[in-house]
């Protein structure tokens, strides 16, 4: 009999001599392990089922894993914390869209994995324009009800401490300097390898390092040395400042999900939302919004004969509730001009 037959026979014999009480106890034998990658894919596929969320990929995204939607999870003690990054089709209502994504993803993770979703952060990182041959759907009005909040189906939540999510930040300012230093290090390694081959006799070229050091040894004071030294000091100070400079925030938090912000929007998307709502009002020909750290500046081109005071009041009544969704609301400044 082969090894597989022997193993099967041994297992059958052991089962025949097992205690019947153990067979009737219903004890689970073995464990089920769900990899983090599987949970990430379930969350990403669930987000795609929400109308308005689109798949976005381009360039090296398939190799770098930057395709949207994508999810980053942290799993521990039967619960998961998810950071979900999505691309939305413009125009859209960010508050309603992120709430729907939040509910659908939480429901799918509870249904398919049985894990408790302790924290789910939805970040809209890109806005996609609809195809020209497809009409754009109007933004969905924001209407919340208690029934919209999906209850966890895997039993009561355990008492877990609330952990604030990471703030979306831009690339560090030191990245270009680090890239230049890396290129310089590669250049030094190349020169050192070349000098080693010359010393070993494997390459017959002229040595660069020895000639350079001899040139420096024969060098005397020249007028250009002082400006070069000052320039190098300035470059060094700038490099230190850039290395210590904190990364700036790329998104604005929304106050929709509890004591800590879990939904974020880019300033560009907030500006687009304001411009789209302002453009739909009667008497407005065009609207352009710029959102910075201090204010939201709305420039409106209005029809002749429209009362500027009434138009400004209408714009404020329409846009200020939307800006109030920000955790740190910015004041609205309206400038009206006529054609």
Image (tube, rainbow, N blue to C red):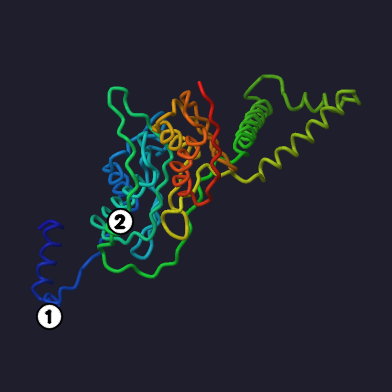
In the visual, does 198 lie left or right of 79?
A: right
Q: Residue at x 41, y 28 (%)?
A: 59
Q: Residue at x 48, y 23 (%)?
A: 304
Is residue 322 or residue 106 the one in the foreground?
322
SS at mark 2?
A: loop
In terms of sequence position, does the residue under pointer 2 or pointer 1 come before the other? 1
Q: Is residue 282 above or below residue 292?
A: above
SS at mark 1?
A: helix
Q: Residue at x 32, y 45 (%)?
A: 44
In the rendered image, which quarter is residue 226 located in? top right
**Which quadrant is home to the N terminus?**
bottom left
Do tag 2 and tag 1 residues touch (Cβ < 8 Å)? Answer: no
> What is the x, y in percent for residue 321?
45, 47
| Mark 2 surroundings: few (<14), some (14-19) or many (≥20) residues within 10 A | few
| Mark 1 surroundings: few (<14), some (14-19) or many (≥20) residues within 10 A | few
> What is the x, y in percent for residue 73?
39, 53
Is residue 61 or residue 161 the one in the foreground?
161
Q: Which mark is residue 145?
A: 2
In the visual, does 38 lie left or right of 276?
A: left
Label 2 vs label 1: CA separation? 51 Å
In the visual, does 59 lie left or right of 167?
A: left
Q: Residue at x 40, y 39 (%)?
A: 65
Give the tally of numbered discs: 2
Is residue 111 or residue 93 the one in the foreground?
93
Give the labeled residue for mark 1.
Answer: 21
> What is the x, y in percent for residue 38?
30, 50
> What is the x, y in percent for residue 279?
42, 31
Closest to the camera, between mark 2 and mark 1, is: 2
Residue projecting furthest to the left: 16
In the rendered image, which quarter is residue 132 located in? top left
In the rendered image, which quarter is residue 120 located in? bottom left
């Amino acid at each position: 009999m082969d090894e597989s037959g022997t193993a099967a026979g041994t297992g059958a014999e052991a089962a025949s001599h097992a205690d019947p009480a153990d067979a009737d106890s219903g004890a689970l034998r073995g464990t089920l392990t769900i990899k983090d990658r599987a949970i990430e894919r379930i969350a990403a596929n669930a987000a795609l089922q929400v109308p308005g969320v689109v798949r976005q990929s381009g360039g090296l995204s398939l190799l770098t894993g930057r395709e949207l939607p994508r999810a980053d999870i942290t799993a521990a003690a039967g619960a998961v914390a998810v950071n979900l990054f999505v691309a939305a089709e413009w125009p859209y209502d960010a508050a309603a869209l992120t709430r729907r994504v939040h509910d659908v993803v939480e429901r799918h993770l509870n249904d398919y994995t049985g894990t408790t979703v302790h924290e789910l952060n939805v970040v809209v990182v890109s806005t996609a324009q609809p195809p020209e041959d497809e009409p754009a759907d109007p933004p969905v009005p924001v209407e919340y009800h208690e029934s919209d909040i999906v209850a966890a189906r895997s039993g009561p939540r355990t008492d877990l401490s609330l952990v604030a999510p990471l703030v979306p930040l831009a690339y560090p300012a030191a990245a270009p300097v680090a890239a230049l230093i890396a290129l310089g290090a590669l250049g030094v390694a190349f020169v050192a390898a070349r000098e080693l081959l010359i010393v070993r006799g494997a390459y017959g070229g002229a040595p660069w390092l020895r000639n350079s050091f001899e040139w420096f040894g024969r060098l005397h004071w020249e007028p250009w040395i002082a400006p070069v030294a000052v320039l190098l000091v300035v470059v060094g100070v700038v490099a230190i400042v850039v290395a210590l400079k904190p990364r700036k925030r790329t998104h604005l938090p929304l106050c929709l999900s509890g004591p800590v912000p879990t939904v974020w929007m880019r300033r560009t998307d907030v500006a687009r939302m304001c411009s789209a709502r302002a453009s739909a009002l009667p008497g407005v020909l065009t609207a352009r919004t710029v959102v910075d750290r201090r204010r939201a500046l709305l420039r409106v081109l209005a029809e002749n004969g429209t009362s500027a005071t009434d138009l400004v009041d209408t714009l404020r009544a329409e846009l200020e509730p939307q800006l109030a969704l920000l955790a740190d609301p910015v004041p609205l400044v309206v400038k009206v001009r006529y054609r």
